[in-house]
């Protein structure tokens, strides 16, 4: 009798466990209903314009006692010609010495208050504690108005630039990137212009000063202020430190808009002895943040090749084991954007990898994404968006994009809501419009002896040497 009772108890317990496991399996088969997209609290963008034309954008956020200031010089696209690279050098030199301070003294003053201040061809950036805001702004305005472009710092920067260019010559990824820029845009377009050892050696301190004098004007610039400051106080600071900045005329040049090639073209850069081929499939696209289909385009590209679970990664890395890493990018721009899909592959599978690239492009265009795929990718994008909000630079970028692209004031506050509404049909339509496997530049950096013949199947082939690349 006792044995029977024990057996019965075990039977009931086992039956209960079995039913519980079955219930769990049934539960897993049904995806939970999606919750409403949360509202994003970014703070309002308050915009003003100073008499000199400087556009001031303020995002108030008092969560932390910190504030950031960004001066963005929205210079029109232009060719630098025989002095290609002068803009980058001029921008870097802004922070390397002024009429009142050497570079060492500037660095010491910045470190003393625990701030972060830097300069580039597109302006200056500074951030730190709210209580140090006047010191930060004083240093930034000193760099902006009183830079001496010291010769000794210029020579150091020039050597660093030349060293970087020499190093890039040995990297197949850098070679592929340079060639892709030239074939995608053309040498006569600013985006296709390359900085070389020859152009850097022609740059002088005077050329750097000339660049600064030509493009650093308040009437084409933005001052974005984010953090623990009120709009009224921010406008007062902007007037105090940058109100004396003199406006001026900045000439604009019209350039022919690059278009994808017809048909697909293949450019092989020969590197004798290479055991791998770097592949970059690329072409220009007309894509702006303000376009109604922009978000669908980004969802499509994230599914294709941006996330680790993307189709290109799952195919070329996880399934075929052709590469350690592969991805794609669709980049918007006010002038002309671009698409690229790239990776490094063993010579023996270079052509096979290209076949799989093209298969994934066509699959994205010809079939709709599954509900599971679409929900997963949108969840990834939502998570990345939320994490980015922790950085003040992200908020500053959002504010700048809103002004530059003429976006609605609530464009980023409604991001998650709009993302949740993207459908499989939207994604397929974006793929059909922006994925162009028949009209692309295929750039390959690798061994001519190993891959040239195989590449002829993908389009007209041009072969160049690594030393003769643009």
Image (spheres, helix red, strand yellow):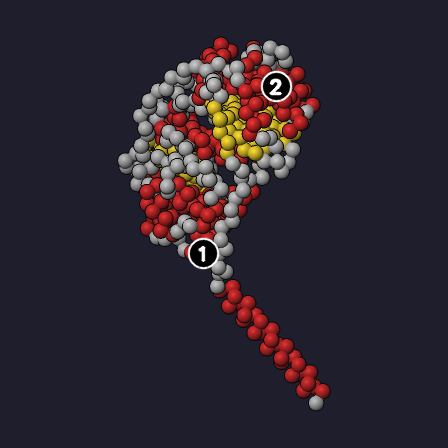
Q: Residue at x 65, y 29 (%)?
A: 129
Q: Which residue is drawn at 39% across and 41% down?
A: 294
Q: Which mark is residue 238?
A: none
Q: Residue at x 36, y 44 (%)?
A: 430
The mark closer to the camera, 2 or 1, is 2
The answer to whether 14 appears left or right of 427 in the picture is right
Mark 2: secondary structure: helix
Q: Nearer the viewer, residue 153 or 128?
A: 128
Number of marks drawn = 2
The answer to whether 53 appears left or right of 442 in the picture is right
Q: Residue at x 31, y 34 (%)?
A: 260
Where is 102 relative to 450, above or below?
above
Instruction: Place residue 459 in its image quadrant.
Output: top left
- Read off the residue under disc 1: 372
Q: Which residue lies furthest to the front in this view?
A: 232
Q: Quadrant of the N terminus?
A: bottom right
Q: Is residue 151 visible?
A: yes
**How far is mark 2 from mark 1, CA to CA?**
53 Å
Q: Position of residue 84 (x, y in %)?
A: 43, 19
* Label located before the other in sequence (2 or 1): 2
Q: Nearer the viewer, residue 276 or 207?
A: 207
Q: In which quarter of the image is the C terminus?
A: top left
Q: Which residue lies furthest to the left in this view?
A: 262
Q: Where is residue 35 in the image (x, y as percent from the top left)?
A: 50, 55
Q: Which mark is residue 138?
A: 2
Q: Is residue 170 visible?
A: no
Q: Which residue lies furthest to the bottom in this view?
A: 1
């Amino acid at each position: 009798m006792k044995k029977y009772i024990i057996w019965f108890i075990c039977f009931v317990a086992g039956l209960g466990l079995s039913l519980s496991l079955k219930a769990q399996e049934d539960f897993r088969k049904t995806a939970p209903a999606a919750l409403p997209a949360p509202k994003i609290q970014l703070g309002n963008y308050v915009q003003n314009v100073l008499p000199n034309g400087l556009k001031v954008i303020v995002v108030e956020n008092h969560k932390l006692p910190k504030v950031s200031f960004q001066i963005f010089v929205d210079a029109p696209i232009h060719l630098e010609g025989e002095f290609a690279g002068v803009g980058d050098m001029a921008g870097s030199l802004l922070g390397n010495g002024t009429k009142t301070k050497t570079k060492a003294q500037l660095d010491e003053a910045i470190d003393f208050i625990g701030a972060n201040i830097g300069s580039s061809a597109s302006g200056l950036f500074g951030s730190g504690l709210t209580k140090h805001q006047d010191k930060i702004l004083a240093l930034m305005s000193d760099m902006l108005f009183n830079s001496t472009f010291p010769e000794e710092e210029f020579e150091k920067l020039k050597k660093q630039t030349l060293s970087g260019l020499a190093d890039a010559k040995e990297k197949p990824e850098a070679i592929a990137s340079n060639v892709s820029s030239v074939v995608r845009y053309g040498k006569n377009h600013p985006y296709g212009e390359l900085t070389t050892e020859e152009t850097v050696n022609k740059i002088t301190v005077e050329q750097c000063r000339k660049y600064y004098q030509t493009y650093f004007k308040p009437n084409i610039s933005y001052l974005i202020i984010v953090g623990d400051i009120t709009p009224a106080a921010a406008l007062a600071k902007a007037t105090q430190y940058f109100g004396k900045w003199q406006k001026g005329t900045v000439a604009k040049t019209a350039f022919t808009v690059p278009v994808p090639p017809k048909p697909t073209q293949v450019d092989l850069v020969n590197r004798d002895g290479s055991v791998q081929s770097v592949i970059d499939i690329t072409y220009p696209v007309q894509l702006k943040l303000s376009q109604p289909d922009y978000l669908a385009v980004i969802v499509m590209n994230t599914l294709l090749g941006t996330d680790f679970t993307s189709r290109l990664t799952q195919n070329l890395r996880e399934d075929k084991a052709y590469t350690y890493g592969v991805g794609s990018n669709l980049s918007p721009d006010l002038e002309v954007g671009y698409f690229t899909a790239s990776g490094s592959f063993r010579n023996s599978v270079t052509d096979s990898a290209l076949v799989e690239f093209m298969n994934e492009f066509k699959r994205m265009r010809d079939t709709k994404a599954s509900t599971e795929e679409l929900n997963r990718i949108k969840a990834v994008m939502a998570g990345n968006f939320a994490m980015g909000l922790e950085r003040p630079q992200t908020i500053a970028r959002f504010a700048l994009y809103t002004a530059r692209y003429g976006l609605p004031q609530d464009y980023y506050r409604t991001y998650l809501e709009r993302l949740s509404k993207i459908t499989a049909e939207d994604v397929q339509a974006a793929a059909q419009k922006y994925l162009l496997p028949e009209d692309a530049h295929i750039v390959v950096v690798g061994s001519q002896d190993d891959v040239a013949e195989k590449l002829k199947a993908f389009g007209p082939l041009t072969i160049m040497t690594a030393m003769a690349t643009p």
